[in-house]
Image (cartoon, rainbow, N blue to C red):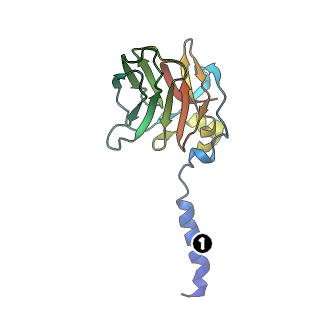
Amino acid sequence: MDSRLTPYLFGFTMLLSAAGCGARQPVASTAPAGPTPARILPLARVIGLETSGPSPSDTTVSFTAGTPRTIVLTHGPPDNIEFASVSFAAHAFADSGQTVTVDIKPRPGVYGLDLATSLPLRSGEARLVFDYARYFSAPARALQLYHSHAGFERVLAVGRVLPDDQIELLSSTHPEPDDIEAVLPVTGSYLVAAPQ
């Protein structure tokens, strides 16, 4: 090979490498070292994480209380990739041995859902994980405020919608890149959001 072409080939290779790096970096590289702190804010003072993917379907599952159970929700066709999962510990419900029905209704356009159970849920005995690897969509306001997707991801938390237009941002962790997880205190409405 002509040695005069070497600098050009090196530059071309570096350009191709840089082009492949344009994708959003995974959460693992930008997530806080520990869980985000819990706090209560007015609902108007948070920015929800939007999804551009096909909406998951409402899901109803019945099972016997007293055994661990995980319910996985997926985006609609054609990809059917994971949207969220709700895991119940063996002691999530007081009436072990009875049938419990769980209703999960995803909220359109955002990483959020409404959770209801036919038996009372014990606080701290269920976990909610949202998986936003594919259809992550940061609203324009989030990018203005945090200047990048990575900056927005750093402050995301699972929030519980409260009465009087408030939200409790729960202590949340990133167990894997592009996942966010929180322990559920009760049933209700939850969404992934960041303070503004």
Residue found 59% across the figure and 81% down from its top: 6
The residue sitting at the bottom extreme is 2
Residue named by callout 1: 11
Of the pair 125 and 185, the residue shown nearer to us: 125
- The image quarter in which residue 106 lies: top left
Q: Nearer the viewer, residue 132 or 69?
A: 69
Direction top: furthest residue: 164
**Residue type, numbered disc 1:** Gly
Q: Quadrant of the C terminus?
A: top right
Q: Is residue 91 visible?
A: yes
Which residue does the image show at 42% across and 22% down from the upper left? 66
Residue 38 location, quadrant: top right
- Is residue 138 among the parts visible in the rendering? no
Nearer to the camera, 119 or 179? 119
| Place of residue 105 in the rendered image (x, y in percent of width and height, measured from the top left) | 39, 24
**Residue in front for this viewpoint, 71 or 9:** 71
- Locate the N terminus and report the quarter of the image it occupies: bottom right
Side of 51 relative to 13 (left or right): left
Count the numbered circles shown: 1
Q: Position of residue 34 (x, y in %)?
A: 66, 37
Please provide percent x and percent y for residue 176: 54, 43
**Residue farthest along the left direction in this orientation:** 77
Q: Does residue 136 appear left or right of residue 150 in this picture?
A: left
- Position of 9 with respect to 92 (left or right) is right
Q: Secondary structure at mark 1?
A: helix
**Residue 15 higher or lower than 95, as above or below:** below
Task: Please tell me which residue is depicted at 67% across the width and 40% down the height of the picture.
Answer: 33
Q: Is residue 80 above or below residue 58?
A: below
Q: State the image coordinates of residue 76 (x, y, percent, origin top left).
A: 34, 37
